[in-house]
Image (cartoon, helix red, strand yellow):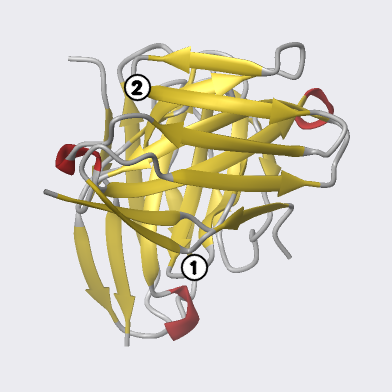
Amino acid sequence: EAQVTQNPRYLITVTGKKLTVTCSQNMNHEYMSWYRQDPGLGLRQIYYSMNVEVTDKGDVPEGYKVSRKEKRNFPLILESPSPNQTSLYFCASSLQGADGYTFGSGTRLTVV
Amino acid sequence: QQQVKQSPQSLIVQKGGIPIINCAYENTAFDYFPWYQQFPGKGPALLIAIRPDVSEKKEGRFTISFNKSAKQFSLHIMDSQPGDSATYFCAASGTDSWGKLQFGAGTQVVVTP
């Protein structure tokens, strides 16, 4: 089944403790992206990647890092999480640009 | 500041009614306008999309209307059903930033039986 897989689905952590949210797609898509979803703000793009080793900032990149060492994987790294990064995170992938992003099921992150 | 402004925030209609969601944008470089549907506990899923070379697109009961001069587009759900109850997001992207898709704030639609 064609899908975007994120792990974990739920995560509670403490301020300052580094964490990684994994994302993998099995559709051989070129583009991958991370979004955060907050009430009243919709989905805001954190980072996106056009191909292996090619990434660019979205609208809210502060406090996040990404890497794209393989085509199928695009992990999101929070080096020193803070409570304002408590949010619902989505990974997405597409064959071509922003056309038809397929989203994962989400990761609900709570930073206390 | 959101580059795509969406309204209303929420909407309740009776079964068979036609909920209408509106979006507006400023960036004239935008040339792709998708709508996503999201059910609770799920990720958004692409519903329908339009490019500025057409003024209307229909897929089943979902219709996008596009007004290039006004920089506005809207989603109509014809003959709405309780199963259409979801959050709907408009979005936009442009060839000047390939891969960068910007979303509106979302509209929660409830269709009552």
Q: Is residue A49 left or right of residue B21?
A: right
The quarter holding residue B18 reads: top left
Q: Is residue B101 left or right of residue A18?
A: right
Q: Is residue B51 above or below residue A39?
A: above
The residue lying at 47 percent from left, 27 percent from top is A101
Q: Is residue B6 above or below residue A14?
A: above
Can residue B53 be seen by looking at this rendering? Answer: yes
Callout 1: SS: loop
Q: Is residue A84 above or below residue B104?
A: below
- Residue B61 numbered tag: 2
Looking at the rendered image, the quarter that the C terminus of chain A falls into is bottom left
Classify mark 1: residues with Cα within 10 Å, few (<14), some (14-19) or many (20+).
some
Q: Nearer the viewer, residue B25 or B97?
A: B25
Tell me the chain of label 2: B
Classify mark 2: residues with Cα within 10 Å, few (<14), some (14-19) or many (20+).
few
The residue lying at 48 percent from left, 75 percent from top is A80
- Residue A79 numbered tag: 1
The residue lying at 76 percent from left, 46 percent from top is B25
Tell me residue B91's x, y (percent). Answer: 59, 39
Q: Are marks 1 and 2 on the same chain?
A: no
Q: Nearer the viewer, residue A23 or B112?
A: B112
Tell me residue A67's x, y (percent). Answer: 54, 41
Can residue A31 be seen by looking at this rendering? Answer: no
Tell me the chain of label 1: A
